[in-house]
Image (cartoon, rainbow, N blue to C red):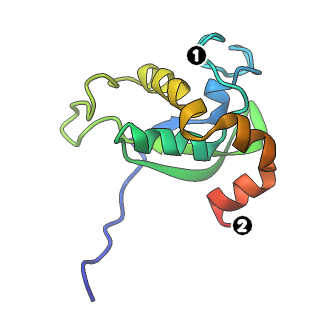
């Protein structure tokens, strides 16, 4: 039978919506990083891949942000161990995570290719299996 899969409680993990790092959005519309650091048209797969590259546990959830309701998906990221210490001392806060993800999204996902050549409905089919 093998080892039983343990269900992970992600409720205490940090939520990252693509809106938080989208250059096209204003801070009043929900962007959480400066315009200079933000990226063009990010998606959940690129954010998830960036978290993997940073060696942080992450899962994609089929949720929507109220300020960007028509864009599906968010990524939950584990920043802290069970004892409360950061997994990566350089990425101890949500803001630090967002800035690191902004640096990686164009490199990891190939934003210029994936965002423009892959239609958004296919990205959602890949991410959510629907």
- Tell me the element at label 2: loop
Task: Quadrant for residue 127, please give it.
Answer: bottom right
Q: Residues within 10 Å of mark 1 (few under 14, many from 20)?
A: many
Question: Quadrant where the N terminus lies?
Answer: bottom left
Question: Quadrant where the C terminus lies?
Answer: bottom right
User: Is 65 situated left or right of 74 in this image?
Assistant: right
Marks 2 and 1, how far apart at CA? 31 Å
> Which residue is rendered at x = 73% and y = 15% of the image?
26
> Which residue is rendered at x = 38% and y = 36% of the image?
54
User: Is 84 situated left or right of 93 in this image?
Assistant: left
Q: Residues within 10 Å of mark 2 (few under 14, many from 20)?
A: few
- Name the outermost residue toward the bottom: 1
Q: Earlier in the sequence, mark 2 or mark 1?
A: 1
**Mark on residue 45?**
none
Residue 47 is situated, as x and y percent measured from the top left of the image, at: 55, 39
Nearest the camera: 24 or 8? Answer: 24
Up-down: is 16 above or below 26? Answer: below
Task: Quadrant for residue 67, please give it.
Answer: top right
Task: Residue under label 1, please give it.
Answer: 33
- Tell me the element at label 1: loop
Residue 30 is situated, as x and y percent measured from the top left of the image, at: 68, 22
Up-down: is 36 above or below 76? Answer: above
Q: How many marks?
A: 2
Residue 93 is situated, as x and y percent measured from the top left of the image, at: 38, 23
> Which residue is rendered at x = 60% and y = 31% of the image?
106
**Mark on residue 130?**
2
> Which residue is rendered at x = 71% and y = 61% of the image?
125
């Amino acid at each position: 039978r093998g080892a039983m899969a343990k269900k992970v409680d992600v409720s205490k993990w940090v939520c990252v919506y693509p809106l938080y790092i989208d250059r096209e959005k204003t801070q009043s519309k929900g962007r959480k990083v400066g315009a200079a650091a933000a990226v063009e048209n990010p998606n959940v797969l690129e954010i998830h891949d960036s978290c993997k590259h940073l060696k942080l546990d992450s899962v994609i959830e089929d949720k929507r942000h109220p300020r960007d309701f028509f864009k599906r998906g968010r990524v939950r990221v584990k920043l802290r161990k069970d004892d409360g210490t950061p997994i990566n001392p350089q990425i101890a806060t949500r803001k630090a995570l967002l800035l690191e993800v902004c640096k990686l999204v164009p490199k990891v996902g190939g934003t210029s290719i994936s965002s423009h050549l892959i239609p958004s409905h296919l990205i959602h089919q890949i991410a959510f299996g629907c």
